[in-house]
Every structure is written in C-alpha cells, then in structure tokens.
Image (tube, rainbow, N blue to C red):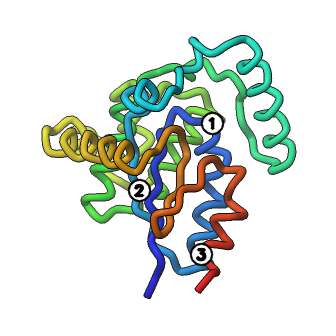
C-alpha cells in the first residue's frame, strides 16, 4: 500500500519553493501519495511561538539570507532572494491550489508555477489577474479556478487544513508528515526519503 505524505506549506515560503522539485521526485520514486495542505501560517505562528519575517531579530534575518544563498548554490536553483512581492498575501494562491486539487487537476504543477512565479519571476501572487494567468499557462481555466478559490467551500477547506496543521503541531513550512512523524524544512528531505523507503 502506498505511503501518504501530508504536505503542509505556503506559497510565500522560499523553502517550499527550494524543496518542491526534489520533494515531488522523492515521492514519485517511492510511489507515495502527496496530500497537499496549503495552510495559513499567519494563524499558526502565534500558537507555536513563531514570528513573521518582518518581526524577527536582525540576527535571524541575516542568518536566513546566508542559508538561502547556500541552498540556492547547493541545489543550483534559480531564486530571487528578496523578490518585490515577498510579503504579498498568498491566501488566494493557497486557495487556488486547493481548488485545483479538489477538481482533480495537476496540483503539483500549478503549485510549482505559483512558487516559481513569486520566487524566480517576481510575480505578485496576491493579484487575481496574475494568478489566473499563471493557472492558464498550465493549461487550466484560470478564471474558473480563481472563482472557485474565492468560494466559501474552498475557504472552509483552507481553514480546515490550517486547523489540521495546528492539530498536527506544525509550526513552519514546509512540513512533511509521514505516519504521524513530522519533518520540518526542505533540508530534511533526505530523512523524508528514508522514511518512505522504510518498511
């Protein structure tokens, strides 16, 4: 029976972007099923002792930049370290991916396109038109997905995923959960792969 991975993340996370391709490749090699769970970190942080980037100490901000550069160079992934819309509200983007998932579309493809749009192309993923364009570029009906993302139904699912993250004691993104065991950060993907290979 295929293993399942609960994948809690947000499109505003550069770490989710840096790990996205490797994560999908690891899951595919293990024939694992990914349960995409975009969630609201703005609600999670206050409950877990975390703070948003603008409120972090200068020491932590400085170290974060060193780490971003290290991982960029190590992985050879194109990333703009401080994109113009880094702090844009990604709620609608998260909800659009949920809508695509519920419609049986290629969730990973859309999610990656949004992540790449923000972190490699400096696109404003808080804008309706930009999101619709990104979805359409992936062969999806961007207008219809945008409308679905704004629906009460998808909003309820987004809230439920956030509540699920809190229940699972998620405190940051990305977090991968396999058989109840959490792995926080794309730098833990080696351990994710080992967990998937274990019997």
User: Which one is closest to the eye, mark 2 or mark 3?
Assistant: 3
Q: Report x, y in % for residue 84.
A: 60, 18
Question: Which labelled disc corresponds to residue 14?
Answer: 1
Q: Report x, y in % for residue 15.
A: 64, 41
Q: Nearer the viewer, residue 180 or 17?
A: 180
Q: Residue at x 60, y 27 (%)?
A: 122
Q: CA distance from mark 2 to mark 1?
A: 17 Å
Residue extending furthest left? 152
| Lower position in the chain sequence, tag 3 or tag 1 | 1
Q: Residue at x 74, y 41 (%)?
A: 78
Q: Report the quarter where the C terminus lies.
A: bottom right
Callout 1: helix, strand or loop? helix
Callout 2: helix, strand or loop? strand
Residue indicated by mark 2: 36
Q: Report the quarter where the N terminus lies.
A: bottom left
Badges 3 and 1: C-beta atoms under 8 Å apart? Answer: no
Horizontal placement of 106 versus 75: left or right? left
In the image, is residue 40 above or below residue 184?
A: above
Q: Nearer the viewer, residue 26 or 102?
A: 26
Horizontal placement of 138 versus 59: left or right? left
In the image, is residue 80 above or below residue 171?
A: above
Q: CA distance from mark 2 to mark 3?
A: 17 Å
Q: CA distance from mark 3 to mark 1?
A: 24 Å
In the image, is residue 45 above or below residue 156?
A: above
Tell me the crowding category of disc 3: few under 14, some 14 to 19, or many 20 or more residues within 10 angstroms, Cα based: many
| Lower position in the chain sequence, tag 2 or tag 3 | 2
Residue indicated by mark 3: 196
Callout 3: helix, strand or loop? helix
Q: Residue at x 44, y 60 (%)?
A: 6
| Lower position in the chain sequence, tag 2 or tag 1 | 1
């Amino acid at each position: 029976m295929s293993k399942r991975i609960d994948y809690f993340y947000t499109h505003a996370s550069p770490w989710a972007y840096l790990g996205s391709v490797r994560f999908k490749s690891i899951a595919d090699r293990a024939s694992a099923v990914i349960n995409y769970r975009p969630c609201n970190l703005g609600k999670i942080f206050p409950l877990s002792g975390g703070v948003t980037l603008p409120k972090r100490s200068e020491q932590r901000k400085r170290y974060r930049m060193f780490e971003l550069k290290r991982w960029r160079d190590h992985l050879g992934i194109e990333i703009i370290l401080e994109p113009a819309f880094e702090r844009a509200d990604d709620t609608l983007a998260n909800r659009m991916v949920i809508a695509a998932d519920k419609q049986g579309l290629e969730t990973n493809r859309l999610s990656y396109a949004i992540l790449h749009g923000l972190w490699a192309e400096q696109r404003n993923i808080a804008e309706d038109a930009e999101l619709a364009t990104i979805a359409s570029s992936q062969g999806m009906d961007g207008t219809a997905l945008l409308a679905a993302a704004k629906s009460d139904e998808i909003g309820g699912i987004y809230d439920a995923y956030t509540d699920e993250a809190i229940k699972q004691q998620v405190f940051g993104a990305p977090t991968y959960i396999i058989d109840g065991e959490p792995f926080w950060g794309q730098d833990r993907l080696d351990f994710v792969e080992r967990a998937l290979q274990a019997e």
